[in-house]
Every structure is written in structure tokens, then in C-alpha cells.
Image: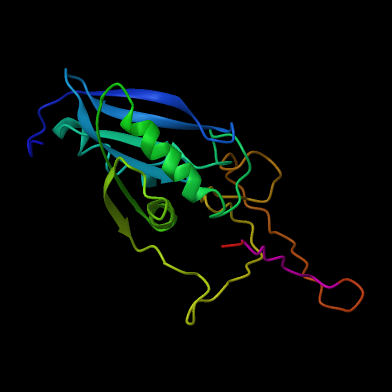
């Protein structure tokens, strides 16, 4: 592929991909506007495929002859299903790689890229060995959140992670208000009404 930006770019919004269990995941595709087939870069994100933090690769690679697929992970934003961190990422990742390899603009050579959660989904998908996966670029993604040295943080907050929208505690749509209302948070710690945190155990 060229290091020069030789192609105008076409954007295809909300292309559906049917996962093996029937759940539909949606992706935006950024592709060179030219004849031929091109290698594909896949980004799978829980942070909203239309947000800036998911789109850093779309400005550089498509003009240089790459197709970039940015997909909302299961249960996030445009995609169907229930978001359960890490549970479906291996199988959904495999299905996405093979789907991307068969897109009309793809030459069948697929790579992945992404940071943080978008890196972890690459690790999990790689263990399933998709036939068309040729390269990965995971950045700052932990290989295990439960090994020595890792910690879980419990935060009582009015933030809207992982979207990072401001929440002014008005009860209105997030990001819509300018006036801030102080939040009233209660954490119970007595025997009658203890606060607790449920941690799911995902079988290997």
C-alpha cells in the first residue's frame, strides 16, 4: 500500500454483521473510493464507533489503500445484544474478522488495531485463530485483570463511563445541561442494608 494519500474515501454507515448466535453487530466502514480490493483493519469498540477515540485510524489509512471497519461491540450503541465485558469478545471477534474478509472491498487480508478495551478484544479473538487474521496491533491492553498487581476499583460516580458524557445530575439528557446540580450518593455499610458488588465469574 502507498504511503501517499492517493484515494478519496467513502463511508458506509451501520453495516450489519450477524454473529453466530443471531445477534446483529453494526459497523461503519471507511474505504478507498477506487476499483480493486484492499486489506482491512478492524477496530472493535465499546466506546461508540462514531466517537473520536475510535476513529484515529480512519483519517490515515483509507486514503492510503486500506479499508477500516469500526464496529460497536455487543450491546453497545448501535449493536444489538447485552454488553457483558469480555464474555463474547472471542467469538464475536472471530465472526467479525471472517465477515470483514468477505466484504466486497476486501482482499481477504485482515488486521486489527486498538487501545485499552479495544486491545483486549484482540487478545481474546486471537485465541480463536480466525483464518483471515494476519496481523494485530493491540496497545496498552492488560492480558489479565486478575493477576497479582491488578486492582478492581469501585467508584460511586455520576459520570457516564465509558461514553464520558458530562452528567449534571438534572435527570435530563446527558450532555444537554449547563447548570450543575450536586449529586446525592448513599453507600450503605450496616448489617441491615449492606452495599455490595457482584463480580461475575466467567468460565475459561
Seen from the viewer's position, the closer of residues 49 and 87 is 87
Q: Where is residue 154? Give x, y as percent.
A: 63, 69
Give the main secondary structure of the magenta stretch: loop
Q: Where is residue 21? Give x, y as percent.
A: 59, 36
In the rendered structure, the answer to whether residue 193 lies left or right of residue 36 reads right
Which residue: 58% across, 39% down?
Answer: 176
Relative to 24, residue 151 above or below: below
Query: Was residue 200 drawn as part of the magenta stretch in this picture?
Result: yes
Q: Where is residue 56? Give x, y as percent.
A: 29, 44
Which residue: 44% across, 38% down?
Answer: 95
* Quadrant of the image occupied by residue 2: top left
* Quadrant of the image occupied by residue 45: top left
Relative to 198, residue 163 above or below: above
- Can residue 104 be seen here? The reply is yes
Which residue: 76% across, 70% down?
Answer: 196
Query: Was residue 191 drawn as part of the magenta stretch in this picture?
Result: no
Q: Where is residue 120? Give x, y as percent.
A: 42, 57
**How are the residues colored?**
rainbow
Seen from the viewer's position, the closer of residues 3 and 42 is 42
Q: Residue furthest bottom?
A: 148
In the rendered structure, the answer to whether residue 202 lies left or right of residue 133 reads right
Q: Which residues are magenta?
A: 194-202
Relative to 110, residue 204 above or below: below
Q: Residue furthest right?
A: 192
Relative to 17, residue 56 above or below: below
Seen from the viewer's position, the closer of residues 111 and 157 is 111
In the rendered structure, the answer to whether residue 102 lies left or right of residue 157 reads left
Quadrant holding the N terminus = top left
- Can residue 49 be seen here? The reply is no
Amino acid at each position: 500500500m502507498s504511503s501517499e494519500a492517493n484515494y478519496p474515501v467513502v463511508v458506509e454507515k451501520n453495516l450489519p454483521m450477524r454473529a453466530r448466535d443471531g445477534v446483529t453487530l453494526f459497523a461503519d466502514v471507511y474505504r478507498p473510493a477506487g476499483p480493486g480490493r484492499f486489506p482491512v483493519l478492524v477496530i472493535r469498540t465499546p466506546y461508540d464507533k462514531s466517537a473520536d477515540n475510535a476513529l484515529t485510524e480512519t483519517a490515515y489509512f483509507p486514503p492510503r489503500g486500506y479499508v477500516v471497519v469500526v464496529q460497536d461491540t455487543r450491546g453497545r450503541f448501535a449493536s444489538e445484544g447485552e454488553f457483558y465485558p469480555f464474555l463474547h469478545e472471542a467469538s464475536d471477534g472471530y465472526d467479525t474478522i471472517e465477515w470483514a474478509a468477505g466484504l466486497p472491498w476486501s482482499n481477504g487480508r485482515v488486521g486489527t488495531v486498538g487501545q485499552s478495551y479495544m486491545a483486549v478484544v484482540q487478545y481474546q479473538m486471537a485465541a480463536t485463530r480466525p483464518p483471515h487474521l494476519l496481523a494485530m496491533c493491540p496497545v496498552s491492553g492488560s492480558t489479565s485483570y486478575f493477576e497479582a498487581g491488578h486492582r478492581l476499583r469501585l467508584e460511586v460516580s455520576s459520570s457516564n463511563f465509558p461514553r464520558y458524557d458530562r452528567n449534571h445530575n438534572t435527570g435530563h439528557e446527558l450532555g444537554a445541561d449547563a447548570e450543575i446540580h450536586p449529586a446525592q450518593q448513599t453507600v450503605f455499610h450496616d448489617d441491615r442494608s449492606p452495599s455490595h458488588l457482584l463480580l461475575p465469574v466467567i468460565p475459561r
